[in-house]
Amino acid sequence: MAGKTIEIKAEGGAFDAYIAAPSAGKGPGVVVVTYIYGIDGDTKGFCDRLAAQGCVALAQNFFWRDQESGVLPLNREGSQRAIARAGRIEKEKVMSDVELAIAELKRHPSCNGKIVMLGFCFGGPYVYLAACRSMIDAGVSFHGTHVSHVVEPGLVPRCPVSFHYGDEDEMAPQAELDAVRKAVTAGGNGELVVHHGAGHGYMFPNRPTGYHAEAARKSWDRAFQLIGALKTVPAPAAE
């Protein structure tokens, strides 16, 4: 289950990604969309946990086209640089990269062909877009930021999605929660869950502040309820 870094060819070059797979058996492929700081130890840890639970997990570098493409520090200066970098992202190019990551997962011998996306903070909008575009079979967002910015009339999640927030998340005021709830539940496939006492970034155990163990456990458990439903693929009907 040891993870490794690979390269995936893309328009204009190639991007790096961290991938971890189970030691035996097959399971869903999971695209892990990290937060604005990049593929750090927490992100790799999530991938390793997913692999230990029977999934093939891949966290791609969403910032490879930027002049600052690496992992940024969890401090005030790093936050400013990370926010500026995230603002330079071209969403459609990123969605093209996601398609390439999904294709990479589906080619993996340990992937059963089903795809899940887990989005942390910055990743929330991409979970929503991927679900609405039928790119994935399930999606979970943990304290997603600016999800309402990508909501458009007619966009409806086409697979089960679960969006999680803390009720003390300064990045998700009530107006944002209301907009996200309306968007993700529009097609009858989604839910929005609010965890009492949790703030922004509550899923990350190594952040200086913000980690909330109970909210993180409940959110992870809910993610695995959706993942568990995709762990087996029905056999084709006999002709």
Image (cartoon, rainbow, N blue to C red):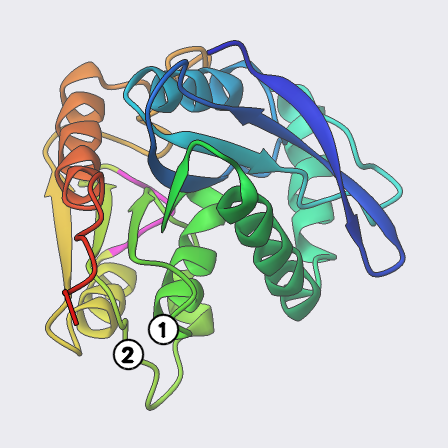
Which residue is at a point 77% across and 42% down the rendered structure image? Answer: 15
| Side of 177 relative to 200 (left or right) | left
User: Residue placed at 64% from the left, 55% from the top?
Assistant: 100
Query: Which residues make up the magenta segment?
Result: 169-173
Q: Tell me which label, 2 or 1, sits earlier in the chain.
A: 1
Q: Residues within 10 Å of mark 1 (few under 14, many from 20)?
A: some
Which residue is label 2 attached to? 156
The residue to which callout 1 is attached is 132
Can the viewer see residue 4? Answer: yes
Secondary structure of residue under mark 1: helix
Query: Which residue is at a point 52% across and 43% down the rendered structure image?
Result: 105
Residue closest to the eye, 112 or 56: 112
Is any part of residue 146 visible from this angle? no
Q: Quadrant of the C terminus?
A: bottom left
Compared with residue 24, is residue 175 higher up or lower down, i.e. above or below? below
Residue furthest out toward the front: 239
Please report contact status of discs 2 and 1: CB closer than 8 Å, yes or no. yes
Q: Amino acid at mark 1?
A: Cys
Q: Quadrant of residue 89?
A: bottom right
Which of the two residues, 108 or 78, is positioned nearer the viewer here? Answer: 108
User: Residue 51: percent from the left, percent from the top?
Assistant: 39, 21
Percent of width and height locating residue 147: 40, 62
The answer to whether residue 59 is left or right of residue 45 is right
